[in-house]
Amino acid sequence: MSFLSIKGLGKRFGSFVAVDKLDLDVERGEFISLLGPSGCGKTTTLQMVAGFIEPTHGTISVAGKDITSLRAEKRGMGVVFQSYALFPHMTVEQNIAFGLEMRGMSGQAMRTRIGETLSLVRLDGLSHRYPRELSGGQRQRVAIARALAIRPEVLLLDEPMSNLDAKLREEMHIEMRAIQRHLNITTVLVTHDQVEAMTMSDRIAVMHAGRIAQLDTPYNAYEHPASNFASTFLGKTNKFVAQALPPVDESSGRVKVGAHTLETAPYRLQGEVHAYIRPEKIHVQGAGGAGLAGRIQTKLFLGSVWMLEVETELGMIRVNAPNREPVTLNEGDPVTLSWNSRDVQVLPTEEVAH
Ligand code: ATP
């Protein structure tokens, strides 16, 4: 049985459905991200788990116990918000002590717990500083320390890194993940940052319009998106409107895009479909090879890759060529694009309700 179990959870604000019949099972020690665009219902879901918003319907249980109507402070959950919400007139130590005192801890036991937690988030030596005397990253660590100090059964994170600069954010992803594994805390993170979700999570729940569109490992969610929405929200992709064709054999598929027939990964659909291929799956070489002919319209250097936009008979195709060696082809040059047909995925044009 899963540790945190959400069944048929829903929230309506008036006639507006913010979260719709959401089911989610999180294993003990698992790190799950709720990933989706602004307004898809991530925060509302997290707030219902935390006990700050009352669900319109559905149940939430932890370790087999129904907590749907339990007050927030009785749920034993650690919560970290985007704004950190530290008390400005209290030192780091006092900020962390606050939650512990509320739970009846005091004296040496409390001081030991604060010391252990500060060292876990690498803030030793800063316990007497005030929040205004800390950097953004340090403040964020205090907020995390405050949530962890109570040794919560469940940790809920609502975009806690979004105020940090890109480099610090990346460091915190790795650090936070290590702390979470070390303490084996069941964690749910709300984010709209797909890199954040991918680096930290065991599984990602891709959310769309109040529902989970896909629940999968980061690798599967990226490599095998289950819907039109998931494939375009997670990373960049090239999309073609296509017509399904009968397959030649069981291990492959075919679609028609305009006058072209494309070989694809196997699929079971009929009629109008969408075919997708990721920019990094496409190989680019000079004109004349086997593949799709095109002409480079744009060439941009992005550091780890060269990003090319290539005009073809199938429309504009984006290619990410790895920066292993200089790409000598330039804007205006004719090229040939090729790829492995297994990397062309075919999905329905309509969103499939889960
Ligand atoms: P963001 O990434 O922008 O925080 P989100 O996915 O977390 O977005 P929610 O905050 O869960 O989205 O909001 C989901 C929807 O519910 C939004 O359309 C929002 O406007 C609406 N909503 C949230 N809270 C209320 C409220 N108290 N009253 C009415 N509508 C609300």
Image: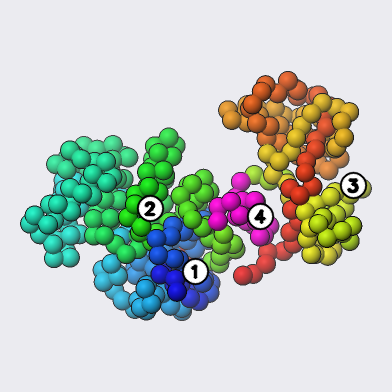
- For the residue with label 3, is its CB less than 8 Å from the closest atom of ligand 1? no
Q: Secondary structure at mark 4?
A: loop
Mark 1–mark 2 Cα distance, whole angstroms, equals: 21 Å
x, y percentage for residue 33?
Answer: 47, 57
Give me the residue at 85% from left, 37% from top.
Answer: 291
Quadrant placement of the C terminus:
bottom right
N-term-proximal mark, 4 vs 2: 2
| Nearer to the camera, 327 or 163 | 327
Q: Secondary structure at mark 1?
A: strand
Mark 1–mark 3 Cα distance, whole angstroms, equals: 42 Å
Mark 1–mark 4 Cα distance, whole angstroms, equals: 20 Å
Give me the residue at 43% from left, 39% from top.
Answer: 170
Q: Is residue 261 above or below residue 280?
A: below
Identify residue type, mark 2. Answer: Arg
Q: Mark 4 highlights which residue? A: 224
Identify residue type, mark 1. Answer: Leu
N-term-proximal mark, 4 vs 3: 4
Q: Mark 3 highlights which residue? A: 260
N-term-proximal mark, 1 vs 3: 1
Neighbor class of circle 3 (other Cα within 10 Å; few <14, some 14-19, many 20+) is: few
Mark 2–mark 3 Cα distance, whole angstroms, equals: 49 Å
Q: Mark 1 highlights which residue? A: 24
> What is the span of residues highlighted in magenta in the rendered image?
217-235
- For the residue with label 2, is its CB less than 8 Å from the closest atom of ligand 1? no
